Image (cartoon, rainbow, N blue to C red):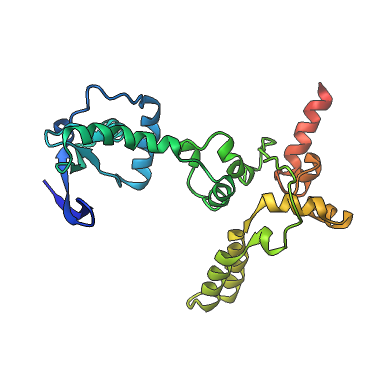
Amino acid sequence: MQSFYFWKRKGKGAVNELKIIYKKIDDVYPYENNPRNNEEAVDVVAKSIQEFGFKIPIVISGDNVIVAGHTRIKAAKKLGMEEVPCIIADDLNDEQIRAFRLADNKSAEIATWDEEKLEQELVQIMNIDMSLFGFSGEESDFADEVTDDKYTFNTSIPQYEITGEQPTIDEMLDEEKSKQLISEIEQAEGITEEERRFLIQAARRHNVFNYRNIAEYYAHATPEMQRLMEKSALVIIDMDNAIANGYAAMFSDVLDIMEGEEDEE
């Protein structure tokens, strides 16, 4: 049985050693009176463990009953795991364990999303399907918006209400990440100049657009600026034009086929 250590607080200001122990999964028992219904979350947690590993230990009492982590233990069983990392909450009395069990679940309900920051994070996750982890509703619309699917008209476009003054250009675009990457590419050795130019173009994909501010800016912009913003697919006013300008990219022959089918009808 493997053991690892990190730190926990005990009392005011005191710091004690906290041990992570790997226990056989059949030796960890669910709390019989667990009031949390978590069946719908098991698949999502299982996929998270598959993708990222088992990063959050199960909290158990001294007699191996789960205090926090019922969903993780079910996900681990679903994945066929034989051992799970555990923390023994031996510094808590029975009443504290009951309270912590409830508080741990309740705190997740209280937390909310900052939609703007969430959009900025989702748009930078290009190679991991976030719908596997429950981002399949309104909160993932922005991620769906940038999906590179050449054969679909299905696009989810966030709707923004105009509320304030016109933002600055800098407030619409964050280039910091792409600048850092471009700097690294420019200094890289062992690549050809042609490869360097290609990588620099690819690095510009890391620019983060603040579409809420873009909508605000569009509302105050000149007609010509509005036209060019639409043509650049920064603002979607006409879906047909957006498709033509690359917002929803489709090969022309696929479009011709679809139009031909409509004519036949």
Q: Position of residue 81 (x, y in %)?
A: 23, 37
Locate residue 83: give its quadrant: top left
What is the number of callouts on the image? 0
Whole-percent x, y for residue 33 in the image: 25, 22
Residue at 39%, 38% (x, y): give it: 107
Residue 64 in which image quadrant: top left
Residue 105 in percent (x, y) is at 35, 34
Q: Is residue 234 visible?
A: no
Height in image: 67 above or below 55?
A: above
Judge left or right: residue 222 versus residue 202: right
The residue that appears at 22% across and 27% down in the rendered structure is 30
Q: Is 41 left, or right, of 142 in this rendering?
A: left
Regarding residue 218, the answer to whether it shows in the image is yes
Asked if 40 appears above or below 165 in the picture, the reply is above
Q: Position of residue 51 (x, y in %)?
A: 38, 44
Task: Quarter of the image for the C terminus: give it.
Answer: top right
Q: Relative to the observer, which residue lies in front, 118 or 238?
A: 118
Q: Would you identify the image quadrant in which residue 54 lies? A: top left
Nearest the camera: 219 or 1? 219
Which residue is at a point 67% across and 35% down the rendered structure image? 154
Residue drawn at point x = 40 percent, y = 38 percent: 108
